[in-house]
């Protein structure tokens, strides 16, 4: 059997060669790989839940969900041809279009980021709002990630220029917790269940909450669609039947989330997702459940908000013409909704 490292190298070379001659395989090895940026995060709950409920298996497709530490990493692997899609933040579709890469959100999981800016216990007296970020070290999952985008916006919007604070990529989960507890970062942006673990034990407090539509609109000035499944448009166009089956499975999952309470949903998740802190996991899901869309549709006022924020500080997007209509499609979701009437 070919080792994973060797196989990845072979695939990467194949992609480079294929790109050079202008051809790309529709599906590698008849397997559809979807990369999730830290699959254990509650913002990406629909990914694992769809698998746990059996909806992905019911598609008849060979679908692999693979987790990587950050959205920026997932994006790179997809562009290399190592995956057919990414479950990450919608803002990546805009960032990639600015770089000449056409990808689309084919289903929108959330209508709010689900992210929270935390301040460590040690720095709480010195940081009472993003206006106090000057001279501080801020933690994000990775440079170029959605947490990086949003943290910079919070600082810039509060009058703190990009060069006046440091940004440190610290990952998520245990790595983020360690960085904050060890004083490597003064504040940072993270999600559930990491958030609840830090606040429950007094290690951090909430500075900015972006878990609901209302709080997101108040802070960002509009709806900010977060988690979605995005794919290269060329692959979508060549594999429409497969995309429809995948989207339909996720629409079923979002319906399940919408019609079941946090405890029922948690019971479907693998025990390792909450460990010995199941109660915290359930409470966190209760607090953030409203971020998910009920049917996978993109909020109409969402894309313009995301573009406005990215244009304020993202150099890759600044000055570039962006066609928002090409960053997402609702046709697959609409077809799935017809299969599951209210």
Image: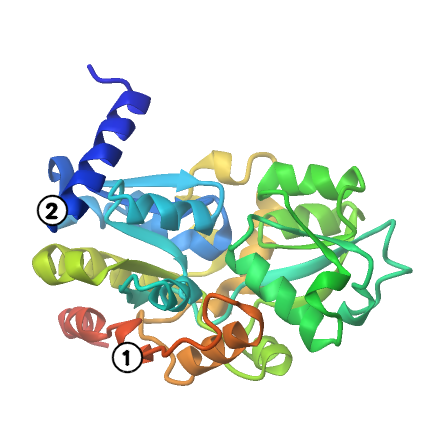
Question: Quick one: SS at disc 2?
Answer: helix
Q: Position of residue 303 (x, y in %)?
A: 40, 78
- Residue drawn 68% across the image and 41% down it: 177
Question: On residue 135, which mark appears?
Answer: none
Question: Quick one: SS at disc 1?
Answer: helix
Q: Quadrant of the N terminus?
A: top left
Residue in front for this viewpoint, 144 or 89: 144
Can residue 62 be spotted in the picture?
Answer: no
Kindly indicate the quadrant of the structure image that contains residue 6.
top left
Of the numbered discs 1 and 2, the one sitting upstream in the chain is 2
Residue in front for this viewpoint, 195 or 241: 241
Can residue 282 be spotted in the picture?
Answer: yes
- Residue drawn 72% across the image and 47% down it: 198
Q: Position of residue 205 (x, y in %)?
A: 77, 57
Q: Of all residues shown, which one is farthest toward the front?
A: 20
- Tag 1 near tag 2, CB within 8 Å: no
Q: Is residue 301 left or right of residue 17?
A: right
Q: Quadrant of the C terminus?
A: bottom left
Q: Is residue 321 above or below residue 34?
A: below
Residue count near mark 1 (Cα–Cα under 10 Å), binned few <14, some 14–19, many ≥20: few
Give the residue pinned by disc 1: 325
Q: Position of residue 194 (x, y in %)?
A: 62, 47
Residue in front for this viewpoint, 40 or 119: 119
Q: Position of residue 333 (x, y in %)?
A: 22, 70
Residue in front for this viewpoint, 233 or 177: 233
- Residue drawn 36% across the image and 65% down it: 93
Give the residue pinned by disc 2: 21
Q: Is residue 248 above or below residue 223?
A: above
Residue count near mark 2 (Cα–Cα under 10 Å), binned few <14, some 14–19, many ≥20: few
Q: Is residue 270 above or below residue 101?
A: above
């Amino acid at each position: 059997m070919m080792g994973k490292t060797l196989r990845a190298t072979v695939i990467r070379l194949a992609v480079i060669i294929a790109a050079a001659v202008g051809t790309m395989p529709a599906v590698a090895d008849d397997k559809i790989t979807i990369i999730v940026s830290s699959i254990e995060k509650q913002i990406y709950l629909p990914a694992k839940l769809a698998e746990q409920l059996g909806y992905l298996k019911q598609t008849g497709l060979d679908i692999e969900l693979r987790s990587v530490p950050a959205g920026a990493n997932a994006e790179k692997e997809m562009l290399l041809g190592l995956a057919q899609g990414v479950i990450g933040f919608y803002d990546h579709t805009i960032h990639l279009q600015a770089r000449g890469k056409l990808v689309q959100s084919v289903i929108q999981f959330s209508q709010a980021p689900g992210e929270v800016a935390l301040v460590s216990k040690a720095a709480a007296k010195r940081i009472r709002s993003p206006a106090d970020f000057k001279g501080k070290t801020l933690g994000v999952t990775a440079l170029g990630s959605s947490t990086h985008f949003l943290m910079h916006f919070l600082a810039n919007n509060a009058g703190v220029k990009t060069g006046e604070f440091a940004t440190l990529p610290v990952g998520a989960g245990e790595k983020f917790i360690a960085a904050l507890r060890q004083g490597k970062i003064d504040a940072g942006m993270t999600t559930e269940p990491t958030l609840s673990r830090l606040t429950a034990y007094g290690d951090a407090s909430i500075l900015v909450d972006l878990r609901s539509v209302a709080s997101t609109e108040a802070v960002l000035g509009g709806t900010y669609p977060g988690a979605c499944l995005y794919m290269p448009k060329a692959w979508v166009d060549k594999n429409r039947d497969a995309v429809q089956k995948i989207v339909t499975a996720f629409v079923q999952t979002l319906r399940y989330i919408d019609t079941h309470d946090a405890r029922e949903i948690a019971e479907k998740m693998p025990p390792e997702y909450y460990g010995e802190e199941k109660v915290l996991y359930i409470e966190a899901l209760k607090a953030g459940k409203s971020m998910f869309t009920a049917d996978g549709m993109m909020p109409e006022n969402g894309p313009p908000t995301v573009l406005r924020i990215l244009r304020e500080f993202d150099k890759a997007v600044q000055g570039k013409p962006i066609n928002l209509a090409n960053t997402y499609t609702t046709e697959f979701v609409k077809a799935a909704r017809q299969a599951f009437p209210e």
